[in-house]
Amino acid sequence: MPTSKTLISTFKIEITGQSGHGSRPHEIKTPAIERAYEVINALNYVNNKWLKIYSGPTTPKIYVTRIQAGSRNTPNQFPGKCTLMLELCTDDSRHKYVLLDLKEAVENASGGTSFDIT
């Protein structure tokens, strides 16, 4: 009986939005950090979905391992880009289906702003 191998993949999601000065938040229509928050919520939803569908030690799981946006030199600036680093743990038999779920969740949550999964 063949056994599945555990796969660990890492992804970088770059979410772009509108940058601007903190004194004028009303002028910023698509803040990257707020879009990143929506993506993280979508990833949590996907994790919960996978817990219901799959069971056992190879239940897929996505982790946000790093969030990077802005600069410490400009704390009053809304950054135009937010980068999320993710780690996906799954097995080889579910990997392609899990990736489709992940891609769909990010596309739906990105709110029409641009992003890249690399």
Image (cartoon, grey):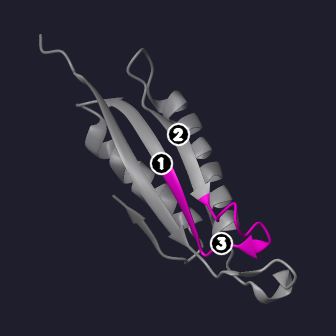
Pointers 2 and 1 in contact (C-beta within 8 Å): yes
Label 2: few (<14), some or many (≥20) within 10 Å?
Answer: few
Label at residue 65: 2
Is 72 one of the magenta-colored residues?
yes
Residue designated by label 1? 85
- Left or right, 73 with reference to 12: right
Q: What's the residue type where badge 3 is placed? A: Pro
Closer to the camera in the image, 61 or 79 = 79
Q: Earlier in the sequence, mark 2 or mark 1?
A: 2
* Residue in view at x 55 percent, y 45 percent: 66
Is 11 one of the magenta-colored residues?
no
Query: How far across and how far down the image is residue 29, in percent?
Result: 72, 84
Closer to the camera in the image, 16 or 75 = 75
Element carrying mark 2: strand
Q: Could you tell me how far apart the alpha carbons at marks 1 and 3 are, in whole angstroms? A: 17 Å
Q: Earlier in the sequence, mark 3 or mark 2?
A: 2
Label 3: few (<14), some or many (≥20) within 10 Å?
Answer: many
**Which of the two marks, 1 or 3, is nearer to us in this view?**
3
Query: How far across and how far down the image is residue 67, in percent?
Result: 58, 50
- Left or right, 4 with reference to 17: left
Element carrying mark 3: loop
What's the magenta region?
69-85
Quarter location, residue 16: bottom right
Q: Could you tell me how far apart the alpha carbons at marks 3 and 2 are, in whole angstroms? A: 20 Å
Label at residue 79: 3
Element carrying mark 1: strand
Quarter location, residue 103: bottom left
